[in-house]
Image (spheres, grey):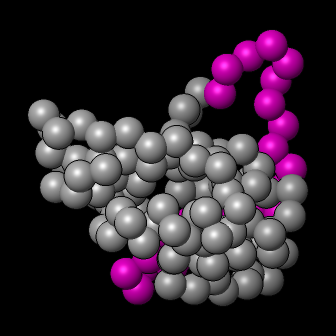
Amino acid sequence: MPVHRIDHVNLNSSDVARTCAFYVDVLGFAEARPMGTGGAWIYLDGHPFLHIRGQAPQPAPDTLPLVDHFALQASDLAGARARLQDAGVAFREASYPQLGFSQIVVHDPDGVKVELNFKDEAA
């Protein structure tokens, strides 16, 4: 059974509308479509990629999350930087010229770490 790609990522959210606005308005995903269960699908390249569930994240006390982050390929580093600054969203930026990419790391409204990788774009 070969695996070909990630189908989708499921995120719990304490506020579905706020989370959808972050991914669509700030990070530039195509659209969010509500689900009958109170959640939403957020689309990337015509495919439902993020499944947002209306349930507050429940981290166990004194533990680290099992998944640290998810990473996305992106383009237009300068535009992404400006978009995040305009939205007042804190981010960390790094450049890895030896690996051929730059990176922005940001957290969504519920604290999920999202890594944006910009191939062959200098910071």
Observer-nearest of 10 and 111: 111
Q: Give the farthest residue toward the top.
A: 62
Residue 108 or 77: which is nearer the viewer? 77
Q: Position of residue 3 (x, y in %)?
A: 25, 51
Image spot of residue 19 (x, y percent): 74, 66
Query: At which x and y percent is residue 58?
Result: 84, 37
> Is residue 51 in view from this perspective?
no
Quarter of the image for residue 31 reads bottom right
Give the residue at x 85% y 18%.
61
Magenta run includes residue 93: no
Task: Tell me what residue is drawn at x 67 percent, y 20 percent.
Answer: 64
In the shown orientation, is residue 61 left or right of residue 123?
right
Report if residue 53 lies within the magenta region.
yes
The vertical placement of 80 against 96, above or below, is: below
Tell which of 65 and 5 is nearer to you. 65
* Residue 2 visible, this orientation: yes
Instruction: Tell me what residue is drawn at x 37 percent, y 47 percent.
Output: 103
Q: Is residue 40 left or right of residue 23?
A: right
Residues rendered magenta in the picture: 42-65
At 60% from the left and 77% from the top, the residue drawn is 24
